[in-house]
Image: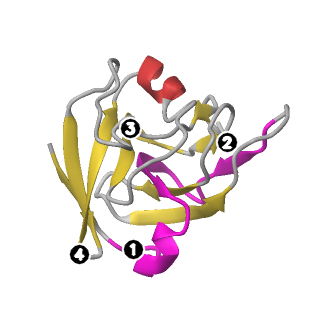
Amino acid sequence: MLFRAMRVVTAFGLAVGSVNASAQAISYVVLKGKTFYVELAENDEQHARGLMFREQMAPDRGMFFIFGAEFMQAFWMKNTLIPLDMLYFDQKLRLVSAQTNVPPCKADPCPSYPSSGPAQYVLELNAGTADKLGVKPGDVLEFHR
């Protein structure tokens, strides 16, 4: 299967410090020495909702998608209002590929943004963050639950 079902990407509920009623437990990740507090998306409903309808996200926030196994990923930006970086990681939390500065989708059909290889985890951050950090394939992510 080239792509598993499209995953909706969205914006993070703690953008201004208030917790969205549907927000999951907050964990953190460390990438290139920078800590990001992440909302977890661990099931199909959370994967589909992602960061939809959120108008902003604090610079140290993100969303971390956890899948049961590695497979080709493809995300899209339907109903996502802020531009994002999508970072795809394998089962060992090594960066497989990145889609950076992905704009919100303005009209259907929305384009998809695939990983270049199988990934088990996806980290969404504000657009431009990956470039500022200088991320590259093989970089390792630390995940703290």
Residue contact at pointers 2 and 3, CB within 8 angstroms = no
Measure the alpha-carbon separation of dots 1 and 4.
15 Å
- Who is closer to the viewer here, 10 or 4? 10
Measure the alpha-carbon separation of dots 2 and 3.
15 Å
Q: Amino acid at mark 2?
A: Leu
Residue drawn at (64%, 36%), measured in percent from left and top?
A: 1
Q: Amino acid at mark 4?
A: Gly
Comparing labels 1 and 3, the label whose residue is closer to the camera: 1
Comparing labels 1 and 4, the label whose residue is closer to the camera: 4
Q: Which mark is residue 55?
A: none
Q: Which residues are magenta?
A: 110-139
Comparing labels 4 and 3, the label whose residue is closer to the camera: 4
Residue drawn at (21%, 38%), measured in percent from left and top?
A: 26
Q: Which mark is residue 33?
A: 4
Q: Is residue 131 above or below residue 28?
A: below
Measure the alpha-carbon separation of dots 4 and 2.
33 Å
Q: Earlier in the sequence, mark 1 or mark 3?
A: 3
Q: Which residue is mark 1?
A: 138
Q: Which residue is mark 3?
A: 69
* In this rendering, position of residue 17 left or right of residue 86: left
Q: Specify few, some or many for label 2: CA neighbours under 10 Å numbering under 14, 14-19, or 20 or more.
A: few
Residue 4: quadrant of the picture: top right
Q: Circle 4 — which element?
A: loop
Q: Which residue is mark 2?
A: 2
